Amino acid sequence: FFLTPIPFPQYALCLTMEEIQRIVARLNEPPFNYKLRLVDFDEKSPAELLQLLNDIFSTMDESMKGDVRDEEDVTRSSRMGNFLLMLKCPLLPPDEGRRQQFMEQFGLGSKNVVYPVFHWALTNYEKLCKKAYLGKYLVRIEPPQEFMQDETLGSLVERYKELQQEFKTTHQTFDQSKATMSRPGAELRAEIQQLEDERRQLQDRIEKLKGNNRNEIAFPAMLAATSAMRQEQDEEVRLQEKMREQRHLLDLAEQRFHETQRRLSALKSSATGGHSAEAILKELQKDVQETAKVIRGDMAGERNRLQETIDRLERQRLEPSRSVEDVERMRVQVRQLERQKDELRESVEKAMNGRGDNKLGMFRQHANMAAAKLSQKEEEVESRLKDLNKSRAEVEELEAKVNDIAAAAGGGMVGPNGRQMTREEFKEYGAQLREKSNSYKVAKATLASLRAESVVLHRTEQILKGRDRNLEEFLNQQEAKAGVTGYRDAQSKLEAASEQTASVDDMKGQTLDEISEIVKTINQNLEEKKTKLKPLIKELKDVRKQYQECQQDYMDKKQRFDSVAVGLATERSMLETECDDLQNECLQEESRYHYLNCLSQIAAAGLEKVQQEEKWTAGQGRLLPEFQNFQELYQNKIAQQESLSKQLRKQQKKIKENEGGNMYQRSLYADLHRLLSAKVKSRIGGGASIDVLGISGQLTADTVDFGNAQVVRID
């Protein structure tokens, strides 16, 4: 099954019937679920095919959603063609002219072009979804070269490329971490099963304790008191942990504050010129050494952790590969060990319950608390690392602000080469800028006078050309005599190039003026918005305080609610257990009642049958017209069976006595049958029609009369 080729043979892409069926089957699967048949798909119009393909593209990228009927053909073809180009569709021809013809047929909805795109998009759907997501951020922008001369635009393009590279690195890191940190489903299921077993054991233990102490009058009060004490102990532990955390954060904040103050005072002293360049350099070198020491410590720890991970992975790689039988054998061993562990745990619990000592639960509780504290410490370490990075960023920001303050005070600023300048160096730098600006003004005035003079000369040239028409020939002759032929053409080209350069310089100057005006407007708008936001920020602080108070009130009430809810849940579980026990007991009694009722009915029926038999035996009625009672009926049946068995024995005896003669006669008839069958087969070509076990039909052989017997002779 092939599709009819389109008018462009180089683009006629053929699909088999199997591939088209695969397209329809994929469209009927999630996330599409169109419930199409092959006939429905084949009968779709070009517009419907394009809409269906656009819906597939919209599942890859949300921006592709829309109705293709609301767009013009050129717009639709351009949009979908750009999307295919972004996905690097291999069906697009590399040549621009052929690609345009391909897109024209695609815009018309030709099946020879649309069907292969369907097959490619649905076959590589998962990969294309990821490529569509990444393509939005990795599109290359190549401005024309004449615009790249602008430094601002060039810096923006370079920054865009750097951000793209950073996005690539971040996405690759995310994929690697996602592949390495995902836990297998078997491990999670095993952990869930273990937690479920522990929860069931705890519930059973709680039920046993409640059952043992249910008759004690003071047990509910004691249970409430111990529960409240446990909650208060947990709350105390939590508050202590929080207090230690807050103290640690306070120490870190004070350290950052003292360090920032030290840096600020050092920068202020260096800005006022009180220190020489060598002293400033020594201080900077000291800071660099301290920072390098911290970084080396962090990097050494990180390197050691990575080396341990590499060694562990290397050991796992060098281990021998496990077969399926090995894995199954290990699983069996694990299950056996788990059963032994459960048995040991149950025996320990029984022994402890019998002894009245329940310290194991307390030890488990302490172990769980220690595990929770360990996880909290790990989170605290991560938060401290984040605070460290944040503090470094704040220090860099403060250093930049100090540079700005020093520059505003006139005491010093950072120069164009990144080095901090003193007051004298800053004055020299300002003098250089003023000198350059004066030189620029003088050069600009000179350029204006030269342009005015060039206008006068150009006008003079035009007047002279009007007076003498043969001036060109005369000038050519003079150039030839002087040996500088083509001098005037070269001069005119140089003048044209200088004029173009001047126009470009004017455009740059206007652009810079416009940019400076835009920057001033933006700064002014920022100041106005800051002024407007100040009262709002103040209100926000008040509202934040109210929010914190409400949140604290909410947490207190929630804690009280949780404590009450736990008691109610415990009481409800007790009532549910009681109800289940009573219901099971009721069902058992009901089942026993039905069983005994059936036995009673069976016994009553048997008793009634015995009573009827006694009446019939006494002459009060008959069971059947032929029989008085069941006894006569059963005796009659027994007599019939005995008579039948006697006849069968006689018949069996007769068969055994005649077995030899009958078997011999049967063998003779079998031999006769084979003999006659062989003769018939040998004469079947002569037209003989013979019955094997008798003479019937017509024979071509002669029939001879021997006395009273007829003999068939077959020649």
Image: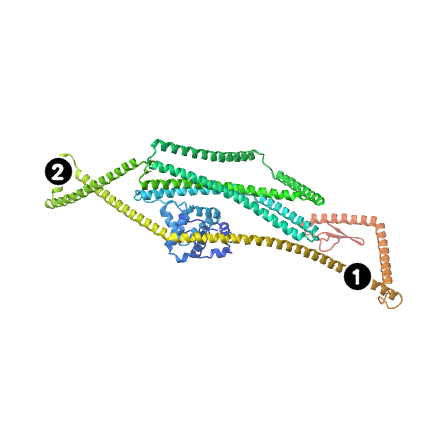
Taking depth in this image into account, of 697 and 431 the one nearest to the observer is 431
Note whether 672 is above or below 438 in the view shown.
below
Q: Quadrant of residue 616?
A: bottom right
Under circle 1, the secondary element is: helix
**Residue type pointed to by label 2:** Gln
Q: Quadrant of residue 361?
A: top right
The residue that label 2 is drawn on is: 477
- Indicate which disc residue 568 carries: none
Taking depth in this image into account, of 414 and 118 the one nearest to the observer is 414
Q: Position of residue 379 (x, y in %)?
A: 52, 42
Image label count: 2
Residue 541 as seen in the image, left or right of residue 436: right
Taking depth in this image into account, of 118 and 679 the one nearest to the observer is 118
Residue 126 as seen in the image, left or right of residue 344: left
Mark 2 and mark 1: Cα distance apart in space:
149 Å
The residue that label 1 is drawn on is: 600
Work out whether residue 464 can be spotted: yes
Q: Position of residue 151 (x, y in %)?
A: 31, 42
**In this rendering, which labeled residue sits more in front, label 2 or label 1?**
1
Under circle 2, the secondary element is: helix
**Residue type pointed to by label 1:** Ser
Dot 2 crowding, Cα within 10 Å, few <14, some 14–19, many 20+: few
Residue 386 as seen in the image, left or right of residue 646: left
Dot 1 crowding, Cα within 10 Å, few <14, some 14–19, many 20+: few
Residue drawn 56% across the image and 35% down it: 316
Q: Quadrant of residue 166?
A: top left
Q: Position of residue 366 (x, y in %)?
A: 61, 42
| Residue, far left | 467
